């Protein structure tokens, strides 16, 4: 029997990953995703594990190559939206993204910013990024959209003298600080390991 759930996590990637793993512990395996929809089939409780990764900076080709690489490693992958864009024919400019991913449309990576990766549970923690360098690169990619939002919000807040832009700037700054602290922690751990 299939189970359908409607959820929206937006940019709360860790919360989405935690929820998917709780569903797997209860005996539900992901079979399909939509804008708000997650569809599961029954499986052995704890049979699979999930990891959710932000890939919004990648081009369509790069994202597809990465998904194929993960599938070749034996994982199942699902693309998922990070925003709740219910319109058709959208285009988004992502100046912080890699070349080829800076303009996202319905035919490229628009509404395909997240990758949900499933693996059979072997009792080991499931992480896609295992080296400190890889973790730092991923953290930098997660930080880029917040830096862009902070700069735009701060400039608009000063230019238009609107409180709402100041609030967006503060929220973005908090996210930037969180990612910067994580980068500093990863760098310290990498330096200690080298010694």
Image (cartoon, grey):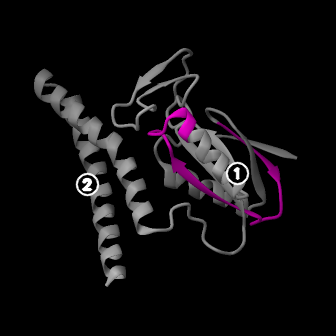
Q: Which quarter shows the C terminus?
A: bottom left
Residue 58 magenta-highlighted: yes
Instruction: Report whether 27 appears left or right of 175.
Output: right
Residue drawn at 53 percent across, 50 percent down:
53
The residue that disc 2 covers is 177
The answer to whether one can see residue 102 in this image is: yes
Quadrant in the picture for residue 31: top right
Residue drawn at 30 percent across, 76 percent down:
191
SS for tag 1? helix
Magenta residues (range): 37-62
- Vertical relation: 193 (above or below) 21: below
SS for tag 2? helix
Q: Residue furthest right?
A: 1
Between 99 and 39, the one lying in front of the other is 99
Quadrant in the picture for residue 111: top right
Q: Where does residue 101 sit, x and y in percent of width and height?
A: 45, 32
Q: Which mark is residue 112?
A: none
Between 90 and 194, the one lying in front of the other is 194
Q: How many marks?
A: 2
Residue drawn at 64 percent across, 51 percent down:
69
Instruction: Report whether 121 appears left or right of 172.
Output: right
Q: Where does residue 95 sit, x and y in percent of width and height?
A: 33, 31
Q: Where does residue 134 sit, x and y in percent of width and height?
A: 44, 61
- Vertical relation: 124 (above or below) 136: below
The residue that disc 1 covers is 71
From the image, state whether disc 2 or disc 1 is nearer to you. Answer: 1
């Amino acid at each position: 029997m299939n189970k359908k759930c409607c959820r929206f996590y937006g940019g709360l990637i860790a919360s989405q990953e935690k929820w998917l793993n709780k569903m797997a512990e209860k005996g539900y395996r992901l079979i399909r995703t939509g804008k708000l929809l997650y569809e599961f089939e029954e499986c052995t409780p704890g049979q699979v594990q999930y990891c959710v990764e932000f890939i919004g900076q990648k081009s369509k080709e790069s994202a597809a190559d990465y998904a194929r690489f993960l599938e070749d490693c034996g994982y199942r992958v699902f693309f998922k939206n990070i925003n709740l864009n219910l319109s058709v024919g959208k285009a988004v400019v992502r100046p912080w993204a890699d070349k080829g991913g800076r303009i996202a449309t319905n035919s490229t990576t628009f509404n395909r910013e997240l990758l949900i990766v499933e693996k059979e549970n072997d009792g080991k923690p499931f992480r896609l990024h295992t080296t400190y360098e890889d973790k730092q690169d991923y953290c930098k990619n997660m930080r880029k959209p917040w830096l862009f939002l902070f700069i735009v919000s701060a400039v608009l807040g000063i230019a238009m003298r609107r409180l709402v832009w100041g609030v967006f700037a503060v929220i973005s700054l908090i996210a930037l600080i969180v990612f910067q602290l994580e980068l500093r922690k990863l760098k310290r751990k990498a330096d200690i390991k080298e010694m």
